[in-house]
Structures are given as structure tokens and as C-alpha cells.
């Protein structure tokens, strides 16, 4: 029995060590190097704590801070409750924009014109703008939303409390996969280049929660094998 317990503890410790050494699996996480992660943001932007940042990028899984004078707040895929709470004159409409003609990969990745750049988005939703907001990126006239032709606004901006707030309807625009498409990386660089930038986000599912728990308590990887050793050498009762 004692050997079984020791073996189980050692196996648990080995599993925890593997989890500790693997990258963060959470989508939109800055520590995730996978296609849905955002590790490339750290290569393009100069990361800084929120309190020192002049650019704050908020991805799914994070609560946006209150806008303050002098910062650029970038909201990726926010819901309407968040937009209303921040006092924005922007709303996300139901349904996705597709483009059979002008896309980065397939119709789910329509291209949008942003100044003199072309950016790719994954399954964006159209934005409805009030008088205080302005369009920043729009899809082509060939794009479709609920069967109706575009163009459609998929990124917008508004000044709020002295901050510039940028709303992008698709949360994937700065993920690793999309930073390799169109001019997404160039756009990100134009937003954060040379500026202290905070990145907030990471959807925590069961796998990501386990990864975070192990990262927060790495001593378990050492303590569990020690417990197994003690059990194996502890004098048996006669």
C-alpha cells in the first residue's frame, strides 16, 4: 500500500512539473505562444504595468480600467454592457461580417481598410456609432452582414475623459495568428511603438486555471516527491 501511495505522489509531481513547464494555454494570454495566444504582442510592444502605461490593450478575460487623460485604451471584442459602462457611443450589432472577395484567408477573415493600411479580422461584428464616435476601420463594399452588402464599421474610436478609446469588434485582431496576416502587426506597432503598454486578457478555462494554480504554487512540485520519499522510508509498524 505504501508503495502505491508513493508512486501516485511521484506521478502527480511529474504531471505538475509538465504543466509548469508548458506555456499558458489560455486564449488571448500574453504568455500563450499558440495561434490564439498573444505572445507576439510582447515582441512588438514595450510592456509596462497598467499604472505606468500610456497604451492599454484589453482582451477578453479582463476588465477594462477607467479611461484617464492621456492614454489610449484599446478594447478588443467588448460587449455592449462594457461599452455602456464606459460611456461609449458605440454598440456591437448581432451577426458577423463576411467577405467572399476581399479576405485574408477565407470569408470569415474579411479585410478592413484602416487609413492606408489593410487589416484582417476574424468573424468581426458590425459596430453602430453614435454622434460622438468615429469609424476607424471599415470592410469592403463586397462584405456581407445578414445578406446585405457593406461597407461596415468594425473598429471605432471616441474621446472619453481625456483618453482615446478604440473599439475593435473582433477580439482576435492581435492574436499570434492574425498578427501574421495583412498589416495587423504594423497597426499594432503604430499604436504601441515606443510607448509603455499594458496588455490585459486571457480567457481562463479549466486547463488555464490548472496552469495558473501550478504556477502560483511551484513548491508543490518539490514537496510532493519529498512526501513520497518520507512515506517510502518511514519505519513500518511491526
Image: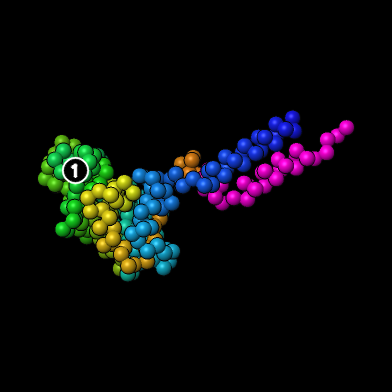
Q: Residue at x 62, y 46 (%)?
A: 221
Judge the density around disc 1: few (<14), some (14-19), many (≥20) Cα neighbours within 10 Å: many
Q: Would residue 95 be visible to someone looking at this image?
A: yes
Whether residue 212 is in magenta: the answer is: yes
* Residue 213 locus on image (x, y percent): 55, 47
Q: Would residue 92 be visible to someone looking at this image?
A: no
Q: Residue at x 17, y 40 (%)?
A: 99
Give the residue at the far right of this rendering: 238
Task: Determine whether, in the image, residue 141 is placed left or right of residue 55.
Answer: left
Q: Residue at x 49, y 40 (%)?
A: 206
Q: Quadrant of the N terminus?
A: top right
Please, is residue 75 above or below residue 232 in the view? below
Q: Residue at x 70, y 40 (%)?
A: 228
Q: Dividing the picture into quarters, in which one does residue 105 lie?
A: top left
Q: Dividing the picture into quarters, in which one does residue 104 lie?
A: top left
* Residue corresponding to mark 1: 103
- How many marks can you see? 1
Q: Quadrant of the C terminus?
A: top right
* Residue 166 locus on image (x, y percent): 28, 58
SS category of the residue bearing label 1: loop
Q: Pick the residue in front: 225 or 117.
A: 225
Please, is residue 204 above or below residue 132 in the view? above
Task: Determine whether, in the image, residue 64 is placed left or right of residue 227.
Answer: left
Q: Pick the residue in front: 217 or 143.
A: 217
Please, is residue 56 above or below residue 126 in the view? below
Main SS, magenta region, reads: helix
Q: Pick the residue in front: 16 or 113.
A: 16
Q: How is the image coloured?
A: rainbow
* Residue 155 locus on image (x, y percent): 23, 53
Whether residue 109 is in magenta: the answer is: no
Magenta residue span: 210-238
Amino acid at each position: 500500500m505504501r508503495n502505491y501511495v508513493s508512486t501516485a505522489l511521484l506521478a502527480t509531481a511529474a504531471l505538475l512539473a509538465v504543466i509548469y513547464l508548458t506555456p499558458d494555454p489560455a486564449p488571448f494570454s500574453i504568455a500563450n505562444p499558440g495561434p490564439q495566444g498573444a505572445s507576439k504582442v510582447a515582441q512588438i510592444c514595450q510592456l509596462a504595468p497598467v499604472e505606468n502605461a500610456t497604451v492599454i490593450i484589453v482582451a477578453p478575460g479582463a476588465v477594462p480600467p477607467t479611461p484617464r487623460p492621456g492614454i489610449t485604451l484599446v478594447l478588443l471584442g467588448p460587449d455592449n454592457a462594457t461599452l455602456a459602462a464606459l460611456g461609449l457611443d458605440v454598440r456591437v450589432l448581432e451577426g458577423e461580417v463576411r467577405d467572399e472577395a476581399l479576405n485574408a484567408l477565407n470569408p470569415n477573415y474579411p479585410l478592413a481598410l484602416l487609413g492606408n493600411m489593410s487589416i484582417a479580422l476574424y468573424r468581426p461584428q458590425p459596430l453602430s456609432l453614435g454622434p460622438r464616435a468615429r469609424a476607424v476601420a471599415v470592410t469592403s463594399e463586397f462584405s456581407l452582414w445578414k445578406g446585405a452588402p457593406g461597407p461596415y464599421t468594425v473598429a471605432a474610436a471616441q474621446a472619453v475623459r481625456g483618453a482615446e478609446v478604440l473599439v475593435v469588434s473582433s477580439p482576435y485582431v492581435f492574436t499570434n495568428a492574425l498578427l501574421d496576416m495583412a498589416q495587423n502587426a504594423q497597426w499594432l506597432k503604430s499604436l504601441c511603438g515606443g510607448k509603455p503598454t499594458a496588455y490585459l486578457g486571457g480567457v481562463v478555462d479549466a486547463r488555464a486555471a490548472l496552469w495558473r494554480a501550478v504556477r502560483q504554487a511551484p513548491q508543490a512540485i518539490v514537496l510532493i516527491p519529498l512526501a513520497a520519499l518520507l512515506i517510502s522510508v518511514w519505519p513500518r509498524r511491526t
